[in-house]
Image: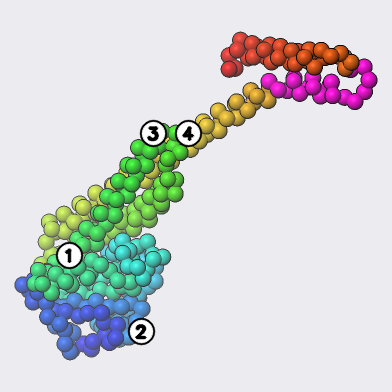
Amino acid sequence: MAQERPGSGLIFGIRLDGRGGSVPVEGDTSAGPLWLHLERHDPAVQAWLATDAGVPPAVARALLEEDTRPRCVVRPDGILLILRGINFDPAAQHEETIAVRLWVEPGRLLSLRRYRVMAVNDLKESLERGEGPGTVADLVLRIVERLTARMIPEIDGMEEDLGALEVASLGDGSAVDRGRLGEIRRRALVLHRYLAPQREALVEFRRTGGERLAELDPMDFQETIDRVTRLVEDLDALRSRAAIVEDGLALKAAERMNRNMYWLSIVATVFLPIGFVTGLLGVNVGGIPGAESPWGFAALVGLLAGLIAIEVWIMRRARLI
């Protein structure tokens, strides 16, 4: 039975020609292999998913829900696959990552997004050049590959920045950009939060996807899973290295503070008796020794110098300085 088009929320709809190219979808959207890329927030898309898309209600709700984590749900009529990619869309500055929601059926792929996904645009352009996938299973694989490939330069850049911060931290730590270090730790935490479950979702898709998609090649998919696994390990290493650098900086700051407090204590110890003597002689009463003598001030200075010398000698004997 023919299915209606999803209306204004259709970003693009293309039919794979099986040779790496595609043709635009016109009219009936029930024949495949078909790829419909949809705007999730569009009311027409939401109504179409609920009524005319041929999608189970539970799947339609999952495709439209606001907050998602990567996961794979295998059903008798298809596979729900929710993925995350790094945000490169200027319109989504407040988002760390952006979601790509996929409903995979034999002969049809529905993908939904809120913000522009560069990996999807890359794949569409490759199809227009005749260099794209020929099946729905290969289409899903290419989407995952491009999402993963766009993460690699970002994580490599974080590693380079962290390496520079590690070198800077070998000194006294004053040259380290603490704000950038905190940003790397936060960014690595956010990416790891989504990439780790994404790896598990891809493993589940590879394991059970062949039951729904006969053309799925588990070996090709395993290569992509291995790359995602390496990225998860890199993020784990980044978080550990950043924590070590931050702990080292905190230790150096504490040592610097302790050293400053130690010398302040030495100075206070030296001047405490001197302050006592000068305070005693500054009392405004009669009978102060040397008040009438022209050598009184010189004698007082000599007394204080001798007192300082005695204090320094005692501190040296006690190995305090």
Q: Which residue is mark 1?
A: 142
Identity of the residue drawn at 68% across and 20% down: 270
Which numbered disc flags the more N-terminal residue, 2 or 1?
2
Magenta residues span 270-288
* SS label for mark 1: helix
Extreme residue in the left direction? 19
Residue 275 on image: x %, y % = 76, 23
Numbered mark located on residue 252 in the image = 4
Spatial CA distance of label 2 from label 4 is: 57 Å
Residue 200 on image: x %, y % = 27, 56
Residue 229 on image: x %, y % = 24, 51
The mark closer to the camera, 1 or 3, is 3
Q: Which residue is mark 2?
A: 43
Q: Nearer the viewer, residue 174 or 299?
A: 299
* SS label for mark 3: loop
Q: Is residue 141 visible?
A: yes
